[in-house]
Protein backbone atom coordinates (compact mmCIF):
# COMPACT_ATOMS: atom_id res chain seq x y z
CA UNK A 1 0.00 0.00 0.00
CA UNK A 2 1.40 3.40 -0.99
CA UNK A 3 2.30 5.65 1.95
CA UNK A 4 0.13 8.66 2.73
CA UNK A 5 1.59 12.11 2.20
CA UNK A 6 1.37 12.61 5.97
CA UNK A 7 3.55 9.53 6.50
CA UNK A 8 6.54 11.46 5.13
CA UNK A 9 8.77 13.19 7.72
CA UNK A 10 7.74 16.81 8.55
CA UNK A 11 10.93 18.24 7.02
CA UNK A 12 10.15 16.51 3.70
CA UNK A 13 6.61 17.83 3.73
CA UNK A 14 7.92 21.32 4.48
CA UNK A 15 10.24 21.15 1.47
CA UNK A 16 7.31 20.17 -0.72
CA UNK A 17 5.21 23.04 0.63
CA UNK A 18 8.06 25.44 -0.11
CA UNK A 19 8.32 24.14 -3.68
CA UNK A 20 4.74 25.13 -4.45
CA UNK A 21 4.06 28.03 -2.07
CA UNK A 22 7.24 30.08 -1.67
CA UNK A 23 7.53 33.25 -3.73
CA UNK A 24 10.89 32.22 -5.19
CA UNK A 25 9.52 28.92 -6.51
CA UNK A 26 6.16 30.38 -7.60
CA UNK A 27 7.66 32.97 -9.93
CA UNK A 28 7.12 32.18 -13.62
CA UNK A 29 9.45 33.92 -16.05
CA UNK A 30 7.83 35.04 -19.32
CA UNK A 31 8.43 33.37 -22.67
CA UNK A 32 8.52 36.86 -24.21
CA UNK A 33 11.31 38.81 -22.47
CA UNK A 34 9.38 42.03 -23.15
CA UNK A 35 6.71 40.88 -20.68
CA UNK A 36 6.97 40.88 -16.87
CA UNK A 37 7.12 37.71 -14.82
CA UNK A 38 4.06 36.49 -12.92
CA UNK A 39 3.33 34.27 -9.93
CA UNK A 40 1.47 31.00 -9.62
CA UNK A 41 0.84 29.85 -6.04
CA UNK A 42 -0.70 26.38 -5.79
CA UNK A 43 -3.08 27.30 -2.99
CA UNK A 44 -5.36 24.30 -3.59
CA UNK A 45 -3.16 22.34 -1.19
CA UNK A 46 -4.60 24.44 1.63
CA UNK A 47 -7.97 22.82 1.03
CA UNK A 48 -6.90 19.17 1.41
CA UNK A 49 -7.19 18.59 5.18
CA UNK A 50 -6.76 20.43 8.48
CA UNK A 51 -3.22 19.22 9.15
CA UNK A 52 -1.90 20.00 5.67
CA UNK A 53 -3.69 23.35 5.76
CA UNK A 54 -1.98 24.23 9.04
CA UNK A 55 1.48 23.10 7.91
CA UNK A 56 1.30 24.60 4.41
CA UNK A 57 -0.15 27.91 5.60
CA UNK A 58 2.85 28.39 7.88
CA UNK A 59 5.16 28.06 4.87
CA UNK A 60 3.03 30.41 2.75
CA UNK A 61 3.07 32.98 5.54
CA UNK A 62 6.87 33.10 5.35
CA UNK A 63 6.42 35.08 2.12
CA UNK A 64 6.57 38.86 2.45
CA UNK A 65 4.00 40.84 0.48
CA UNK A 66 3.48 44.56 -0.11
CA UNK A 67 0.04 46.00 -0.75
CA UNK A 68 -0.10 49.12 -2.93
CA UNK A 69 -3.32 51.15 -2.81
CA UNK A 70 -4.17 54.15 -4.98
CA UNK A 71 -7.24 55.84 -6.51
CA UNK A 72 -5.80 55.25 -9.99
CA UNK A 73 -6.31 51.60 -11.05
CA UNK A 74 -4.81 52.32 -14.48
CA UNK A 75 -1.46 52.94 -12.76
CA UNK A 76 -1.10 49.23 -12.11
CA UNK A 77 -1.00 48.42 -15.81
CA UNK A 78 1.77 51.01 -16.28
CA UNK A 79 3.70 49.49 -13.39
CA UNK A 80 3.31 46.02 -14.87
CA UNK A 81 3.83 46.71 -18.58
CA UNK A 82 6.30 49.61 -18.55
CA UNK A 83 8.02 48.98 -15.23
CA UNK A 84 8.08 45.19 -15.75
CA UNK A 85 6.98 44.76 -12.12
CA UNK A 86 5.04 41.50 -11.72
CA UNK A 87 1.95 41.53 -9.54
CA UNK A 88 0.84 38.71 -7.28
CA UNK A 89 -2.75 39.87 -7.77
CA UNK A 90 -4.77 43.04 -8.33
CA UNK A 91 -8.35 44.23 -7.92
CA UNK A 92 -10.73 42.68 -5.43
CA UNK A 93 -8.40 39.86 -4.40
CA UNK A 94 -5.70 42.38 -3.52
CA UNK A 95 -8.26 44.55 -1.70
CA UNK A 96 -9.30 41.78 0.67
CA UNK A 97 -5.81 40.33 1.18
CA UNK A 98 -4.58 40.98 4.74
CA UNK A 99 -1.31 39.04 5.07
CA UNK A 100 0.95 41.89 3.95
CA UNK A 101 3.92 43.39 5.81
CA UNK A 102 3.87 46.82 4.18
CA UNK A 103 0.97 48.95 3.05
CA UNK A 104 1.84 51.60 0.47
CA UNK A 105 -0.93 54.18 0.15
CA UNK A 106 -0.52 56.78 -2.62
CA UNK A 107 -2.94 59.62 -3.32
CA UNK A 108 -3.10 63.38 -3.86
CA UNK A 109 -3.49 66.09 -1.18
CA UNK A 110 -6.99 67.15 -0.22
CA UNK A 111 -8.72 64.03 -1.53
CA UNK A 112 -10.35 62.07 1.30
CA UNK A 113 -11.22 58.41 0.90
CA UNK A 114 -13.67 57.32 3.64
CA UNK A 115 -12.96 53.67 4.40
CA UNK A 116 -10.72 53.76 1.29
CA UNK A 117 -13.72 53.56 -1.02
CA UNK A 118 -12.85 54.48 -4.58
CA UNK A 119 -9.36 53.02 -4.34
CA UNK A 120 -7.76 49.98 -5.94
CA UNK A 121 -4.94 47.73 -4.78
CA UNK A 122 -2.09 45.70 -6.19
CA UNK A 123 -0.12 43.04 -4.34
CA UNK A 124 3.59 42.53 -5.05
CA UNK A 125 6.30 40.43 -3.42
CA UNK A 126 9.21 41.84 -1.45
CA UNK A 127 11.53 40.68 -4.24
CA UNK A 128 9.80 43.12 -6.61
CA UNK A 129 9.81 46.16 -4.33
CA UNK A 130 13.09 47.54 -5.70
CA UNK A 131 11.87 47.45 -9.33
CA UNK A 132 8.64 49.15 -8.22
CA UNK A 133 10.37 52.08 -6.50
CA UNK A 134 12.91 52.31 -9.33
CA UNK A 135 10.11 52.65 -11.89
CA UNK A 136 8.38 55.26 -9.72
CA UNK A 137 11.67 57.17 -9.45
CA UNK A 138 12.14 57.07 -13.24
CA UNK A 139 8.55 58.22 -13.79
CA UNK A 140 9.16 61.25 -11.58
CA UNK A 141 12.33 62.14 -13.51
CA UNK A 142 10.49 61.75 -16.81
CA UNK A 143 7.51 63.86 -15.67
CA UNK A 144 9.01 66.75 -13.75
CA UNK A 145 6.98 67.71 -10.70
CA UNK A 146 5.01 64.45 -10.52
CA UNK A 147 5.98 63.66 -6.92
CA UNK A 148 5.14 67.17 -5.76
CA UNK A 149 1.49 66.32 -6.39
CA UNK A 150 1.52 63.04 -4.44
CA UNK A 151 1.20 61.87 -0.85
CA UNK A 152 2.77 58.63 0.33
CA UNK A 153 1.92 56.79 3.52
CA UNK A 154 3.86 53.66 4.47
CA UNK A 155 2.56 51.34 7.18
CA UNK A 156 4.80 48.55 8.45
CA UNK A 157 3.05 45.69 10.21
CA UNK A 158 3.30 42.07 11.23
CA UNK A 159 0.32 40.46 9.49
CA UNK A 160 0.23 37.47 11.82
CA UNK A 161 0.82 38.82 15.35
CA UNK A 162 -0.62 42.20 16.40
CA UNK A 163 2.01 44.76 17.48
CA UNK A 164 4.92 42.32 17.12
CA UNK A 165 8.14 44.08 16.14
CA UNK A 166 9.37 43.49 12.60
CA UNK A 167 13.09 42.54 12.64
CA UNK A 168 15.47 45.32 11.68
CA UNK A 169 16.71 43.50 8.55
CA UNK A 170 13.16 43.19 7.24
CA UNK A 171 12.24 46.77 8.17
CA UNK A 172 15.30 47.89 6.20
CA UNK A 173 14.33 45.84 3.13
CA UNK A 174 10.78 47.16 3.29
CA UNK A 175 11.54 50.85 3.78
CA UNK A 176 14.93 51.72 2.29
CA UNK A 177 13.83 51.26 -1.36
CA UNK A 178 11.66 54.35 -0.81
CA UNK A 179 14.80 56.40 -0.20
CA UNK A 180 14.78 57.29 -3.91
CA UNK A 181 11.18 58.59 -3.78
CA UNK A 182 11.75 62.30 -3.11
CA UNK A 183 10.07 65.71 -3.35
CA UNK A 184 6.65 64.38 -2.31
CA UNK A 185 3.95 66.70 -1.01
CA UNK A 186 3.66 64.46 2.06
CA UNK A 187 5.64 61.42 3.19
CA UNK A 188 4.85 59.53 6.40
CA UNK A 189 5.90 56.20 7.88
CA UNK A 190 3.80 54.39 10.45
CA UNK A 191 3.93 51.08 12.24
CA UNK A 192 4.23 49.44 15.59
CA UNK A 193 7.75 49.33 16.95
CA UNK A 194 9.30 51.12 13.97
CA UNK A 195 13.03 51.27 14.67
CA UNK A 196 14.42 54.84 14.91
CA UNK A 197 17.68 53.73 13.25
CA UNK A 198 15.85 52.55 10.14
CA UNK A 199 13.66 55.66 10.07
CA UNK A 200 16.74 57.90 10.34
CA UNK A 201 18.57 56.01 7.57
CA UNK A 202 15.54 56.45 5.32
CA UNK A 203 15.42 60.19 5.99
CA UNK A 204 19.13 60.54 5.17
CA UNK A 205 18.69 58.63 1.91
CA UNK A 206 15.75 60.78 0.85
CA UNK A 207 17.75 63.95 1.62
CA UNK A 208 20.42 63.07 -0.97
CA UNK A 209 19.74 65.04 -4.19
CA UNK A 210 19.19 63.09 -7.39
CA UNK A 211 21.98 63.31 -9.98
CA UNK A 212 21.36 65.97 -12.61
CA UNK A 213 21.16 65.15 -16.34
CA UNK A 214 24.64 66.65 -16.67
CA UNK A 215 26.02 64.30 -14.01
CA UNK A 216 24.29 61.26 -15.51
CA UNK A 217 25.75 61.99 -18.94
CA UNK A 218 29.24 62.59 -17.53
CA UNK A 219 29.06 59.24 -15.72
CA UNK A 220 27.75 57.49 -18.82
CA UNK A 221 30.60 58.74 -21.01
CA UNK A 222 33.16 57.89 -18.31
CA UNK A 223 31.87 54.30 -18.15
CA UNK A 224 31.96 54.07 -21.94
CA UNK A 225 35.57 55.27 -21.97
CA UNK A 226 36.45 52.71 -19.29
CA UNK A 227 34.88 50.03 -21.49
CA UNK A 228 36.97 51.22 -24.43
CA UNK A 229 40.16 50.78 -22.40
CA UNK A 230 39.17 47.25 -21.44
CA UNK A 231 38.39 46.54 -25.09
CA UNK A 232 41.92 47.61 -26.08
CA UNK A 233 43.30 45.22 -23.46
CA UNK A 234 41.32 42.34 -24.87
CA UNK A 235 39.08 42.10 -21.81
CA UNK A 236 35.94 41.84 -23.89
CA UNK A 237 33.41 40.59 -21.34
CA UNK A 238 34.45 43.25 -18.86
CA UNK A 239 34.18 45.87 -21.60
CA UNK A 240 30.63 44.72 -22.38
CA UNK A 241 29.66 45.12 -18.73
CA UNK A 242 31.01 48.70 -18.70
CA UNK A 243 28.93 49.50 -21.76
CA UNK A 244 25.82 48.04 -20.11
CA UNK A 245 26.61 50.08 -16.97
CA UNK A 246 26.94 53.17 -19.16
CA UNK A 247 23.44 52.57 -20.51
CA UNK A 248 22.22 52.28 -16.93
CA UNK A 249 23.80 55.60 -15.99
CA UNK A 250 21.56 57.34 -18.55
CA UNK A 251 18.42 55.44 -17.47
CA UNK A 252 18.40 52.74 -20.13
CA UNK A 253 17.87 49.30 -18.65
CA UNK A 254 19.60 46.46 -20.50
CA UNK A 255 19.04 42.82 -19.63
CA UNK A 256 20.24 40.35 -22.22
CA UNK A 257 18.64 41.44 -25.48
CA UNK A 258 15.98 43.55 -23.79
CA UNK A 259 16.67 47.28 -23.80
CA UNK A 260 14.15 49.61 -22.16
CA UNK A 261 14.57 53.38 -22.41
CA UNK A 262 13.37 55.42 -19.44
CA UNK A 263 13.33 59.12 -18.56
CA UNK A 264 13.43 60.67 -22.05
CA UNK A 265 11.84 63.83 -20.65
CA UNK A 266 14.61 64.18 -18.05
CA UNK A 267 17.16 64.94 -20.78
CA UNK A 268 15.11 67.34 -22.91
CA UNK A 269 16.84 70.51 -21.81
CA UNK A 270 19.84 72.73 -22.44
CA UNK A 271 22.73 71.41 -20.36
CA UNK A 272 23.87 74.06 -17.88
CA UNK A 273 27.27 72.77 -16.77
CA UNK A 274 30.03 70.25 -17.36
CA UNK A 275 31.68 68.96 -20.50
CA UNK A 276 28.56 69.36 -22.61
CA UNK A 277 27.42 72.75 -21.34
CA UNK A 278 25.28 74.59 -23.89
CA UNK A 279 24.33 71.42 -25.78
CA UNK A 280 20.93 69.77 -25.85
CA UNK A 281 20.73 66.94 -23.34
CA UNK A 282 18.66 64.67 -25.59
CA UNK A 283 21.25 65.02 -28.40
CA UNK A 284 24.20 64.27 -26.14
CA UNK A 285 22.38 61.23 -24.79
CA UNK A 286 21.61 60.04 -28.33
CA UNK A 287 25.28 60.32 -29.29
CA UNK A 288 26.27 58.20 -26.29
CA UNK A 289 23.58 55.62 -27.04
CA UNK A 290 24.73 55.17 -30.63
CA UNK A 291 28.41 55.07 -29.65
CA UNK A 292 27.62 52.38 -27.09
CA UNK A 293 25.82 50.24 -29.66
CA UNK A 294 28.72 50.65 -32.09
CA UNK A 295 31.16 49.54 -29.39
CA UNK A 296 28.99 46.62 -28.29
CA UNK A 297 28.79 45.36 -31.88
CA UNK A 298 32.57 45.65 -32.16
CA UNK A 299 33.06 43.76 -28.90
CA UNK A 300 30.87 40.90 -30.07
CA UNK A 301 32.85 40.81 -33.32
CA UNK A 302 36.03 40.49 -31.28
CA UNK A 303 34.39 37.63 -29.35
CA UNK A 304 33.36 36.09 -32.71
CA UNK A 305 29.78 36.08 -31.47
CA UNK A 306 28.40 37.15 -34.82
CA UNK A 307 24.79 36.41 -33.93
CA UNK A 308 24.81 38.93 -31.06
CA UNK A 309 26.82 41.43 -33.09
CA UNK A 310 24.26 41.24 -35.89
CA UNK A 311 21.32 41.46 -33.46
CA UNK A 312 22.59 44.60 -31.70
CA UNK A 313 23.52 46.32 -34.93
CA UNK A 314 20.39 45.38 -36.85
CA UNK A 315 18.07 46.50 -34.05
CA UNK A 316 19.56 49.99 -33.97
CA UNK A 317 19.63 50.22 -37.76
CA UNK A 318 15.96 49.25 -38.06
CA UNK A 319 14.96 51.73 -35.34
CA UNK A 320 16.99 54.46 -37.02
CA UNK A 321 15.45 53.74 -40.42
CA UNK A 322 11.92 53.67 -38.98
CA UNK A 323 12.40 57.02 -37.25
CA UNK A 324 13.70 58.72 -40.40
CA UNK A 325 11.88 57.06 -43.31
CA UNK A 326 8.73 55.70 -41.59
CA UNK A 327 9.55 52.33 -43.17
CA UNK A 328 8.25 49.80 -40.65
CA UNK A 329 9.91 46.78 -42.22
CA UNK A 330 11.90 44.58 -39.83
CA UNK A 331 14.44 43.59 -42.47
CA UNK A 332 17.46 45.48 -43.71
CA UNK A 333 16.68 44.74 -47.37
CA UNK A 334 18.78 44.00 -50.43
CA UNK A 335 21.07 46.35 -52.30
CA UNK A 336 18.25 47.43 -54.58
CA UNK A 337 16.57 49.22 -51.70
CA UNK A 338 18.72 52.25 -51.06
CA UNK A 339 16.67 53.42 -48.08
CA UNK A 340 19.84 54.53 -46.37
CA UNK A 341 20.25 57.37 -48.89
CA UNK A 342 17.17 59.03 -47.35
CA UNK A 343 18.86 59.03 -43.95
CA UNK A 344 21.91 60.93 -45.17
CA UNK A 345 19.97 64.20 -45.33
CA UNK A 346 18.82 63.73 -41.75
CA UNK A 347 20.95 65.74 -39.32
CA UNK A 348 21.69 62.83 -37.03
CA UNK A 349 23.83 63.81 -34.01
CA UNK A 350 25.86 60.56 -34.08
CA UNK A 351 26.57 60.34 -37.80
CA UNK A 352 30.03 58.69 -37.60
CA UNK A 353 29.02 56.19 -34.91
CA UNK A 354 26.01 55.21 -37.04
CA UNK A 355 28.37 54.61 -39.94
CA UNK A 356 30.42 52.26 -37.75
CA UNK A 357 27.27 50.37 -36.82
CA UNK A 358 26.50 49.93 -40.54
CA UNK A 359 30.02 48.64 -41.22
CA UNK A 360 30.34 46.37 -38.21
CA UNK A 361 26.90 44.89 -38.74
CA UNK A 362 27.92 44.22 -42.35
CA UNK A 363 30.90 42.22 -41.06
CA UNK A 364 28.62 40.23 -38.76
CA UNK A 365 26.21 39.69 -41.66
CA UNK A 366 29.01 38.36 -43.82
CA UNK A 367 30.07 35.91 -41.13
CA UNK A 368 26.46 34.72 -40.98
CA UNK A 369 26.23 34.56 -44.80
CA UNK A 370 23.52 37.21 -45.00
CA UNK A 371 24.67 38.36 -48.42
CA UNK A 372 21.89 40.88 -49.12
CA UNK A 373 22.48 42.58 -45.78
CA UNK A 374 26.20 42.84 -46.47
CA UNK A 375 25.68 44.72 -49.74
CA UNK A 376 23.18 47.19 -48.32
CA UNK A 377 25.07 47.83 -45.08
CA UNK A 378 28.45 48.25 -46.75
CA UNK A 379 26.98 50.82 -49.14
CA UNK A 380 25.50 52.69 -46.19
CA UNK A 381 28.80 52.53 -44.28
CA UNK A 382 30.72 53.86 -47.27
CA UNK A 383 28.30 56.78 -47.60
CA UNK A 384 28.43 57.59 -43.89
CA UNK A 385 32.21 57.20 -43.56
CA UNK A 386 33.62 58.62 -46.81
CA UNK A 387 37.00 59.37 -45.20
CA UNK A 388 37.52 55.88 -43.73
CA UNK A 389 39.95 54.02 -45.97
CA UNK A 390 39.10 50.62 -44.45
CA UNK A 391 35.43 51.01 -45.31
CA UNK A 392 36.12 52.44 -48.77
CA UNK A 393 38.56 49.64 -49.56
CA UNK A 394 35.99 47.10 -48.41
CA UNK A 395 33.35 48.71 -50.62
CA UNK A 396 35.63 48.63 -53.67
CA UNK A 397 36.43 44.99 -53.04
CA UNK A 398 32.74 44.22 -52.79
CA UNK A 399 32.05 45.97 -56.05
CA UNK A 400 35.02 44.50 -57.93
CA UNK A 401 35.49 41.01 -56.55
CA UNK A 402 32.45 40.26 -54.45
CA UNK A 403 33.89 40.07 -50.95
CA UNK A 404 37.16 40.66 -49.12
CA UNK A 405 37.82 40.32 -45.41
CA UNK A 406 38.99 43.30 -43.41
CA UNK A 407 39.56 43.99 -39.71
CA UNK A 408 36.85 45.74 -37.69
CA UNK A 409 37.29 49.46 -37.11
Image: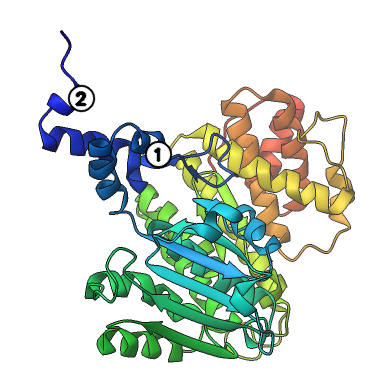
- Quarter where residue 159 is shown: bottom left
Q: Considering the numbered disc 1 on the image, is that residue within a helix, a strand or a loop?
A: helix
In the picture as drawn, the residue positioned furthest to the top comes out as 1
Q: Nearer the viewer, residue 397 or 8?
A: 8
Q: Name the residue that disc number 2 marks.
A: 5
Instruction: Give the mark count.
Output: 2
Q: Residue at x 62, y 22 (%)?
A: 369
* Mark 2 closeness class: few <14, some 14–19, many ≥20 residues within 10 Å: few
For residue 394, above or below residue 184? above
Quadrant of the image for the N terminus? Answer: top left
- First of labels 1, 2 by sequence position: 2
Q: Position of residue 186 (x, y in %)?
A: 56, 90
Q: Nearer the viewer, residue 376 or 92?
A: 92
Q: Position of residue 292 (x, y in %)?
A: 56, 58
Q: Considering the numbered disc 2 on the image, is that residue within a helix, a strand or a loop?
A: helix
For residue 344, above or below residue 221? above
* Mark 1 closeness class: few <14, some 14–19, many ≥20 residues within 10 Å: some
Amino acid sequence: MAPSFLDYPPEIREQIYAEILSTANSRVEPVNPEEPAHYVYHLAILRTCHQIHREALKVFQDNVFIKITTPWPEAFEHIRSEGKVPSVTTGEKAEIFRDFHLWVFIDTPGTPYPNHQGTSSMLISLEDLDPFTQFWHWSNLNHHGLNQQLRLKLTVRDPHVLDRKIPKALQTRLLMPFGMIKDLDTFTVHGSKLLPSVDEALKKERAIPDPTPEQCLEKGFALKDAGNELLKLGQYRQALQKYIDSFGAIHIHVSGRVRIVHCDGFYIRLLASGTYQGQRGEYVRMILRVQLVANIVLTYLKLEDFVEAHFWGKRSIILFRQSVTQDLSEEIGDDGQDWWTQTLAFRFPAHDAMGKIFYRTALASRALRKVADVKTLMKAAAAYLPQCEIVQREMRALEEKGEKRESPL
